[in-house]
Image (tube, coloured by chain):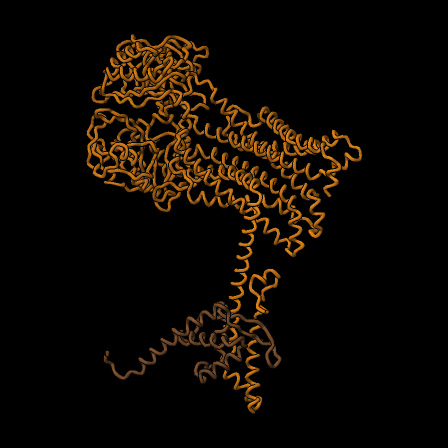
Amino acid sequence: MTLTPGWRRLFRIPRVGRRGIERDVDDELSFHLAMRVEKLRDRGVPEEIANAEALARFGDASRVRDELLTIDQQFAREARLMDWLDSVRADLRYAIRTLRRSPVFTIVAVLTLAIGIGATSAIFSLVNGILLEPLPYAHPEQLVSFAQSYPEKGLDSWQLSQENLAMYRDGASDFASFAGFARRGVTLGGEHPERLTVERTTGEFFQVLGVAPLLGHTYGNAEDTPRTNSVAVLTYAFWQSHFGGRRDVVGTVLDLDGEPVTVIGVMPRSFAFPRSDTQVYLPLGLDPTRRFGWFLGGVARLAPGVTVEQAHRQTTQIFRRWAADMPQLLPPGIVPERTGLTTLVRPLQSAIVTDVRRPLIVLQAAVLLMLLIAVANVATLQSSRAAGRAREIAVRGALGATRTRVGRQLLTESIVLAILGGVAGAALAWIGVREFTASGIVTLPRLDDVRVDPRVLAFTLLVSLACGVLFGLAPLWHAVGRRATSDIARAQREGSHRGARRVNNVLVVAQLGLSVTLLVAAGLVLESFQHLVRTDLGFDPRGVTAISTPLPMMKYGTNASAVPFTETALRTVRSLPGVRSAAFVQVVPFSGAVNTDGYLIEGHAPPSATGTEKQVVTNVVTPGFFRTLNITLLRGRDFTTADRDGSLPVTIVDETLAREYWPDLNAVGRRMRLTGDTTWLTIVGVARSVRDEDVATPSRPHMYTPIAQQPTTWLTLVVRSDGDATATTDAVRRAIHGIESGIPLDGVRPLTQYVDHALDTRRMTEILLGAFALMAVLLAAVGIYGVMSLYVSNRTREFGIRMAVGAEPSRVVRLVLSEGIALAIVGVVLGVGGALIASRWIGSLLYDVSAHDPLAFTVLPIALGALAVASCVLPARRAAKSDPLVALRAE
Amino acid sequence: MADTESDLLRSSLDLLILKTLSWGPMHGYAISEWIETATDSLCLVEEGTLYPALHRLERRGWITSEWGVSAHNRRAKFYKLSTTGRARLRAESPVWQRNAGAIAAALRRTSSEIA
């Protein structure tokens, strides 16, 4: 009889091995030869001749033998593979049938996993898109960001002047190309003038990034001189929104700040440098003779084979040579080599994402902890089923299934479950990521590159498989780990043997420990965020609307004419209903822009050399600014309309600056001046310090000057209003347009939004971490309850007997509870240990909170421990109700 | 497969084996004897070439094998036509006959003209 592979498997007949195959082949061939010889002998041929004749007729026997061995070995291999595939298919069928038989378990497990895996994949898509995915430019590994540093002057990251830019571009051979860029606003003229976000770049900008335009061409150094700069390259988004993607846009002339500018090209969609909200690129009009004015960001492409370190050395030399020529910069007798003057050359990708790297990694770690809890949860569910399935498994063992075989079957089941969870999780992640990126709740660098791509899906699959193996271990332990599977009756009776109980204990401790770690870490971050939000900024952004009102350059080019405009506008706006106060300001807090300058205080020894003055943040305001933002004036007075061109030049300094020279803040009447300006400004007031760059860092010294004495067309109207801000804002816009129709008024934002955006990354971390921790606690609570219930139901018989022999129900309750409390204590202690490690690691995300914050480290673990004990109460009460009769009858 | 024998010869040998086994299970020696007799020793110049063909057919699933005892009370490997092998035989032989007939007719022609 022939055995089909299926039968072979059933009876576990081993396939013939290499030795067996050889023997069979030899037997077959020698049988043939023997038969031939016999036949020849029968015909009367002598023995030796018959042998020779048989061999001759057979041909090359050793070649045939080799050929047969090859064929048979291949055949055997194929058969083994088929067997294996067959068994996998059978396991899968069996697993799916089993899962379908317990739909509630399956659904709960899949959902739990879907949440864990979904969150993990969603965060991984952020990590992937922002941190891992290479920048969408040619040879991104050659791209570096570039800045200068002069720590002695407080210039940790110092941008480039036009002279700086030209000297690196022309002098640094380690760079294949070098460009600078600066963000500017320009007004697009037309029927409805509009403010555009423009990046002014030097000529090699597009060459550095190595991206070809989608349409037309880009500009180069030839278009980037002070005289020739009337061309523009559009971003894809701007082309779509303003030209409907029309292909004949090249050649169109735009009215930008009253100048005709010709569109020469459109960039592809993926091009979003340095920021994705850029609308138009314009040549800067580089003037290499401009030594001062450090406002350019630098980006460069390394020459082939050059390392970041080499480029850093070369550019630092150039930088120091330049500085040596600048007596303003260096104290006399000091050579650049003895200072901290250096350039900052960093791989572009890490430079772009530097602020979000740590938060993202922390989130990924947090979500993995949550996933582990979800896995422990499913393992608990599995355990409870394994106990119930002990009989089934024992039967299979008795029927001849080996332990490995049963183990493989159970593992297949777990993996099927995990993959179902992974598929659901991937769907959740996809929805989550789409909503998150579209919502615009937070602005992250490279958010456009975040999507669920093949790498994320591969990650999801891998995570799912790992989860399957992990929680598949629990039932394996139950089923296969037990030594004797022969005793069916006992297997049925005892779901609670020692090994299984140990697994359950590990599960409880793990879930509790992980959730304590996660919750404490989240607690620290949440507390930090609360501190940040409650940080006194020195001004009150609530109720203030910022309306960007850039004045048309052409008309107000002389700047001085801006003053009458502001006065008329303020008079009109202040008279509007709902407006409490209003003012113009040059730089709105948290708008990302900041002007700094060196300063001197009269009567204080000037620094040993010009150029080494301390730095102050300067801002230009109209009267009423301090009142509008609720910035307290600690000394002196606000500016008035009497502070005008020709009257005494005045300034208001902030507390930080004043304290440095006059600890009692009596600064009024003193004089100071900005470097490069010979006019002495008299201090007429001291304002409270405001944080306007970063919520988490104390503010730098500030000084304010009145617009009438320092005219500018770069203005934002700030309005504090009562009641309906929208209605007031509309009235304000109408009023402004009534005075000057050429102003684009589309930049209207509540001041709180500026502050909020500054907290974006932190807010995202806080919200997501909080959500993960909450989810983790929920999962852990459910899981612990599950384990304890299982524990009780497995010992129903024991409790029944205890009570039958006279144990009080309260004793049984105590027994169960004490077990629970012991586990809770171990879990909490381990969790606190984990949290101590975690808190050190997330130190940089904390603000005004100690990494060992007693509140987070006591209240939260105790609360969780209590929750764990509480989830034992119900099972304990159930244990106390164990009826001895029922328990015994169940035997 | 690194065989030098032509495809034609091999496929005809395969077909012959299937045909042989259509009479019932046989061991390799019996198959070679039958083919020898049936083809006047034309198709099996070397008997050894039969065995790779047999093993290949087995791997393809057209024949199966099992060890049994020969008429002379020796351990021998018997081959048997499988269901797919039988179907194969039924499908192939008419094709082969038609082709062989056509080729033979063509080879018999004496003129290059197209009739």
Who's brown, chain-wise? B
Residue A118 x %, y %: 49, 38
Q: Is residue B64 left or right of residue A158?
A: right
Residue A616 visible, this orientation:
no
Front residue of this view, candidates A128 and A415? A415
Q: Quadrant of the N terminus of chain B?
A: bottom left
Front residue of this view, candidates A696 and A330? A696
Q: Quick check: A15 above or below A776?
A: below
Residue found farthest to the right = A805
User: At x 65% / y 35%, what residue is drawn?
Assistant: A789
Choose top left, top right, bottom left or bottom right for residue A741. Answer: top left
Q: Quick check: A436 above or below A390?
A: above
Choose top left, top right, bottom left or bottom right for residue A571. Answer: top left
Who's orange, chain-wise? A
Residue A716 visible, this orientation:
yes
For the image, the number of numbered tags is: 0
Front residue of this view, candidates A669 and A285? A285
Q: Quick check: A476 above or below A157?
A: below
Q: Is residue A629 left or right of residue A84?
A: left
Residue A47 x %, y %: 58, 89
